[in-house]
Image (cartoon, rainbow, N blue to C red):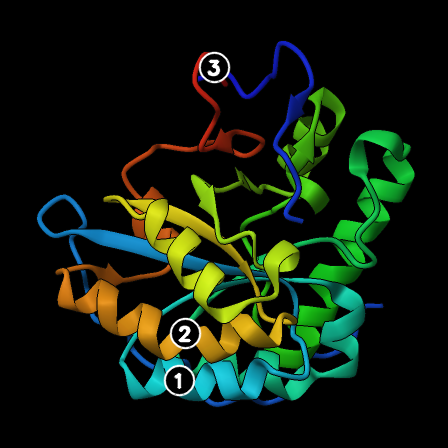
Amino acid sequence: MSRHFTSLLAIAAVAVIAAPAPAVAAPKEKKEVDCTQVKCLALTFDDGPSKYAGKLLDILKKHDAKATFFLQGQYVKSRPSFVKRMVKEGHGIGNHSYSHPDFTKADAGKIRSEIKKTNDAIKKAAGVEPKLLRPPYGLSDLQVSDIAAEFGMPIVLWTGGSRDWESRDVEKIKKQTMSVVKGDAIILMHDWVKQTVDAMPAIIKTLQRNGYHLVTVDDIIKHQDLKPGDAFPLPEGWEN
């Protein structure tokens, strides 16, 4: 599988300085889920950790659900305790840049700095380094792919979005989220949208009642044989 894009990959947006890692509690051992045998779905939250992350983590813990957080380094730096808790409770962690610029309009040095600063901030906060990259706005091109490969990171996008940033409405978020649910879905959400966090108990209950296991992105992509710089999922008609 080649990691090179043949042209600009544009997914519509629905849219830290190295230091010794602190002593952290060991991550909670994850239950093994075989997504080839059961229905799986990954809830992903971009741009955090926000001020609502603690409430969201409480909800996920109560319902024994896992999620993946694509974090901005600037907020990791200001809210490190949430990142530490995410790792401890078995959630996935990904890199979503430091300050959310459009990577397709940035030079190589800027992109490398944004990725490295965020990796460093996450490692300082929680003692782990993210292995997945989600570029801001889901926008990527050959340069972004090459730099992701330098960091050993596949690019993870999404299969559908909640459009929570747009509606800011609990009922609309629930309805839109359920409209994009399918097996092995990767759903885009944002933990800075309060209404998303408010909608989560009902969304999780509905998904679990319908037989879905709420897992991390790693569980979804483990059988995809992704190489560093590869993107997943791709729109119909695209090839890595």
Classed neighbour count for the residue bearing mark 1: other residues with Cα under 10 Å, few (<14), some (14–19), many (≥20): some
User: Which residue is denoted by mark 1 in the rendering?
Assistant: 59
Image check: 103 left or right of 132?
right
As helix, strand or loop, the secondary structure at mark 2 comes to helix
Classed neighbour count for the residue bearing mark 3: other residues with Cα under 10 Å, few (<14), some (14–19), many (≥20): some
Amino acid type indicated by mark 1: Ile
Would residue 16 be seen by someone viewing this image from the given angle? Answer: no
Name the residue nearer the viewer: 192 or 132.
192
**Residue at the (85%, 50%) spot, across then down:** 113
**Residue at the (81%, 51%) spot, across then down:** 114
Which quadrant of the figure has residue 9? Answer: top right
User: Which residue is denoted by mark 2 in the rendering?
Assistant: 200
| Number of marks | 3
Name the residue nearer the viewer: 200 or 219.
200
C-alpha gap between disc 1 and disc 3: 37 Å
Location of residue 224 with respect to 66 vertically, above or below: above
**Residue at the (44%, 74%) spot, across then down:** 199
As helix, strand or loop, the secondary structure at mark 1 comes to helix
Name the residue nearer the viewer: 132 or 183.
183
Would residue 204 be seen by someone viewing this image from the given angle? Answer: yes
**Do the numbered discs 1 and 2 sit on residues whose CB atoms are within 8 Å?**
yes
Circle on res. 239: 3
Circle on res. 194: none
Amino acid type indicated by mark 2: Met
**Residue at the (8%, 48%) spot, across then down:** 37
Amino acid type indicated by mark 3: Glu
